[in-house]
Amino acid sequence: MGMLVFRNIFRPQIAAVALGLGALLMPAWAFADSAVEPAMKHMQHAYNQALRSMDVPQFQSALTVLHQYADVAGSLQYGRTADVRGTYQDGIRELQADLADVDAALVRNDLIAAKEILRTQVASTKKMYHKSLKVEEDD
C-alpha cells in the first residue's frame, strides 16, 4: 500500500523527470528535423499566397516571406546521415537559385513570368528533393 501511495503522489514528478532526461539525451538531429517542418509549412503558405496574388506588391510580399523561410530552412540541419544532410542542403540551394529567377522576373515587372517560374521550376525542385528525401507532401 505504501508503494502505491508513493507512486500516485510522485507520478507527475517522475514523468516530468523522465521526459526531461529523454529530451536531454535525444540527439541534436531529432530537434533539427522537427524545426525544419514549421519552416517548410511557412514556405508552402507563402508559395500559395504568391500564386494567388493579384499584383506585384502582393506577390513581392509573399515572395519576401518565402525567401525568409528558405533562409531559415537553409540554416537548419535535416537528416541523420551526411548524405541526407547534403541532399537537403543541395535542395535548399537549388530553391534559392530558383527564387533568384523569380526575383529577376519581378525586376522586369513580369508577374506572369514570376508566377510561372514558381509554378514550374520551384514546384519541380520541391517535388524532386521531397522525393529524394522521402518527404510526404501535403499540398
Image (cartoon, grey):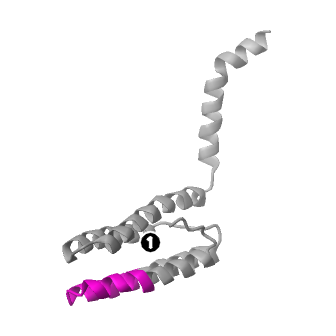
Left or right placement of residue 105 versus residue 46 in this view: left
Find residue 20 and report its image quarter: top right
Residue found at x 60% / y 45%: 23
Residue 88's x, y, as percent?
A: 54, 75
Predominant SS of the magenta segment? helix
Whether 79 is drawn above or below 87: the answer is above
In the image, the segment drawn in magenta is 96-121
Q: Residue 13: within the magenta? A: no
Residue found at x 33% / y 68%: 49
Residue closest to the eye, 96 or 29: 96
Taking the image as drawn, is residue 71 in sight? no
Taking the image as drawn, is residue 29 in sight? yes
Q: Residue 112: within the magenta? A: yes
Quarter of the rendering occupied by the N terminus: top right
Are there few (<14), some (14-19), or many (20+) residues within 10 Å of tag 1? many
Which residue matches tag 1?
A: 74
Residue 91's x, y, as percent?
A: 50, 79
Residue 98's x, y, as percent?
A: 39, 85
Residue 46's x, y, as percent?
A: 36, 67
Left or right placement of residue 112 versus residue 129 in this view: left
Left or right placement of residue 91 versus residue 61 in this view: right
Amino acid type, mark 1: Gly
